[in-house]
DNA sequence: CCTCGTATAATTGTATACAATATACCTTCC
DNA sequence: GGAAGGTATATTGTATACAATTATACGAGG
C-alpha cells in the first residue's frame, strides 16, 4: 500500500471540509457551477451551513484537483477546459491506459476479471435497451476496474485524475451518439487480450481505444462546445469583467 | 494558455499561505523533514511566525502535491516513497517523456533549443570539473526545458509533478556515481534528434533515457535505502506508534 | 503484572473577529 | 464630457477563541 491510496483514504467524508470538498466537486462536475463562474466563500458557506474556514480549505483542495482556479485576493473560479486540454489529456491517457492494460494483464485478480466480464455483459444489455445513463456508468466503471487491476496506486491515481477531469466534457458529447456499441466492443477486446495473457495486444488495444474515443468526441461536437479555436483558451472571452 | 499554468501563476508567493507552502515544500524535498515525520500546525506556525490558518491551508496543498498525508483529527505526515512508487513513476515518465520529446520536436522554440544546447555544453564542462551540484542542477533544468518545449501545459504540469516527486530519492543516489556523463550524452542525443526533426527517434531516446536512469538508480543503492522488499511499504515499519 | 477505564493534556476542526486588498461608484477637477 | 482620485463596499487573508477528537498517563481492579 503506497502513500497514494492513503491520501485518498484521508479524503475525509465526515468532516465539514471533506463534505464541502466532495459536494463542490460533484456540483462542478455535474455542471451546477458553470465554467468561469465565481465561487464566493460566504455564499457557499451559507448554502451548506458552515463557516468560511472549511470552505476555504476545500477550495485549496479543489484547486489542486484542477477544478477551480484561485486568484489571490480576488476569488475562486471554476476552470474552463479548452479543446487543447482535452486533446492533450486523451494523448496522455492513450499511453497510460495502454501501460495500465499491459500491467493489468499480469496483475489482475480473479474478482476483477469477473467484474470486467460482467461489466461488458451488462453494457451489451443496456445498449440494446438504449439505457444511456447506465451505459455511461458502466463505461466509467470499466476503466476504473482496469485502473485498479494494474496494481500501481500511482498509475491508478493519475489515470483517475485525468478521467475525472474529462468527465465534464464527455457528458456533453457521449449521450447523443452511437459510440456506445463500438466502445463496448473495444472493451471486450481489451478484456479478452488480458484474459488471454497477451499484454502487448492489451496495451495496443487500450491505446487505440482512447484514440477512437477522442476522434469520436471531435466528430460529435467538441468544437461546437469550445469553439473553432482549438488550442486557444475559452477564458479569454470572459476576462473583461 | 490553459487553466493549468494559471493555476501555477496563482501559487501565491507573497501571501503567508503561499510562503508557508513553498517553504515546507522546499524543506521536505531537501530532507529537512524526514519521511513519516509528523508536522504539527502550531510548531510550524511558530517557527515561521504565522498563525495556524495559513499553515493549515498550506498543508491542504502539500497533501494534493503528494508530499504529506493528512489523517483527519490526527496529523500531517511526510509521505514515504516506496521502491515500488519509484519504479512506477519511472515507468510512467518513460512514456510521457517520450511523448514530450516527440511533441517538442514540432513545437520547440529557437530560444528553448539554444538553452538546451547550452545546457548540454555546460554539463560537459562541469562533468570535467566534477561539480556534482551543478551537474544535478543542469540535469533537472534539461528536463524542465523539454517539458516547456512540448507546448502542452497539461503534460508539462504532469511531468513536473513526477519529476519533483522523485527528486528526494534522486538526491540520495545520483551524487555518488558516474552516471553524469552517460546521462548528458543521452541528453545530447535527444537534443540532436529534436534538432534534426526526427520525432520518432527523439521519443525513443527519451523513453530509453528514463529506463537507463531507473536501472542506474537500482544499481546504485535504491534497495539499500528502501530495503529489499521492493513493492512493500516503508510505512508499515512505523505504524505501531 | 497486566488490563481496562478514566482523567488530563495535546492536537486538530470549526467559527468568528479583525486586517488587507480589490472593486465600484461617485466626486472633483481639467 | 471625460479622466483622475478618493471613499465606500464587498471579498479574501489572517489571527484567535472555542469545540471536538485523539493520545497519554495514571490508577483501580482483576
Image: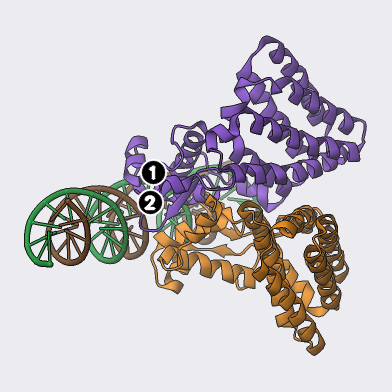
Chain colours: A orange, B purple, C brown, D green
Q: Position of residue B230 (x, y in %)?
A: 59, 43
Q: Quadrant of residue A89?
A: bottom right
Residue B238 appears in the picture as rendered: yes
Label annotation for residue B163:
none
Check disc 1: other Cα within 10 Å, few if <14, some if 14-19, many if 20+: some
Is B203 situated left or right of B223 in this image? right
Q: Which residue is mark 2?
A: B75
Secondary structure under tag 2 reads strand
Q: Position of residue D2 (x, y in %)?
A: 65, 51
Secondary structure under tag 1 reads strand
**Chain label for disc 1:** B
Is B62 situated left or right of A146 in this image? left
**Chain label for disc 2:** B
Q: Which residue is mark 1?
A: B39
- Nearer to me, B164 or A17: B164
Residue B157 appears in the picture as rendered: no
Check disc 2: other Cα within 10 Å, few if <14, some if 14-19, many if 20+: few
Residue at image position (71%, 51%) is: B2
Q: Distance from label 2 to label 1 (Cα)?
A: 7 Å
Is B160 situated left or right of A187 in this image? left
Amino acid at each position: 500500500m503506497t502513500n497514494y491510496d492513503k491520501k485518498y483514504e484521508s479524503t475525509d467524508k465526515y468532516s465539514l471540509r471533506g463534505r464541502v470538498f466532495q459536494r463542490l466537486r460533484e456540483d462542478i462536475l455535474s455542471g451546477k457551477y458553470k465554467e468561469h463562474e465565481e465561487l464566493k466563500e460566504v455564499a457557499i458557506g451559507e448554502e451548506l451551513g458552515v463557516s468560511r474556514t472549511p470552505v476555504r480549505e476545500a477550495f485549496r483542495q479543489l484547486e489542486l484537483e484542477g477544478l477551480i482556479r484561485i486568484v489571490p485576493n480576488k476569488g475562486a473560479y471554476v476552470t474552463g477546459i479548452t479543446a487543447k486540454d482535452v486533446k492533450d489529456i486523451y494523448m496522455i491517457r492513450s499511453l497510460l491506459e495502454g501501460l495500465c492494460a499491459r500491467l493489468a494483464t499480469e496483475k489482475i485478480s480473479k474478482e476483477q476479471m469477473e467484474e470486467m466480464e460482467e461489466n461488458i455483459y451488462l453494457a451489451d444489455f443496456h445498449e440494446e435497451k438504449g439505457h444511456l445513463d447506465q451505459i455511461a456508468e458502466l463505461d466509467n466503471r470499466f476503466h476504473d476496474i482496469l485502473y485498479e487491476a494494474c496494481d500501481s496506486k500511482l498509475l491508478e491515481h493519475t489515470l483517475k485524475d485525468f478521467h475525472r477531469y474529462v468527465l465534464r466534457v464527455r457528458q456533453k458529447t457521449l449521450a447523443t451518439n452511437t459510440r456506445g456499441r463500438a466502445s463496448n466492443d473495444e472493451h471486450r477486446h481489451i478484456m479478452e487480450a488480458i484474459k488471454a495473457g497477451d499484454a502487448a495486444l492489451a496495451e495496443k488495444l487500450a491505446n487505440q481505444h482512447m484514440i477512437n474515443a477522442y476522434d469520436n468526441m471531435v466528430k460529435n461536437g467538441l468544437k461546437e462546445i469550445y469553439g473553432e479555436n482549438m488550442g486557444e483558451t475559452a477564458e479569454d472571452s470572459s476576462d473583461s469583467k
